[in-house]
Image: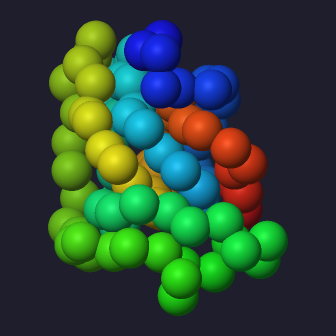
Amino acid sequence: MNPHTKSQRLVAEAVVTGSIVKVYSSLADTAIATCTFGSFVDTGDFNLASSSITQTNASSIPLTIGTYLEGPFAAIHMNAVATVIYYNGELKVS
């Protein structure tokens, strides 16, 4: 973990909202279904309205086994393959 990362969590088939630093693909067929690049601002309700959004991507991003995709992300939607999420602060998984 880099010094700016607080924690890590394993997620699959979920929408993840929070201050996401990066994602790690440890399995085949991992993909980010959609994502929002930017800095997450925690207002207590996980609403992205107060966050600094730089780009929204509606296209799937495939990840090769053993690779990282660096953020920052404010939100990501992962496919059904378990993926490691590195983040700071609180994280909402739904």
Residue plotted at (48% across, 45% down): 20
The answer to whether one can see residue 23 in this image is yes
Q: Is residue 23 above or below residue 31?
A: above
Q: Give the quarter of the image for residue 73.
A: bottom left
Residue plotted at (41% across, 60% down): 39
The answer to whether one can see residue 82 in this image is no
User: Which residue is the extreme one toward the bottom?
Assistant: 49
- Image location (x, y in percent) of residue 53: 33, 74
For residue 29, side relative to residue 2 (left or right): left
Residue plotted at (73% across, 48% down): 90
- Image location (x, y in percent) of residue 67: 24, 19
Q: Nearer the viewer, residue 65 or 46?
A: 46
Q: Is residue 90 above or below residue 65?
A: below
Q: From the image, which quarter does the C terminus lie in?
A: bottom right
Q: Give the quarter of the image for residue 64.
A: top left
- Image location (x, y in percent) of residue 88: 60, 38
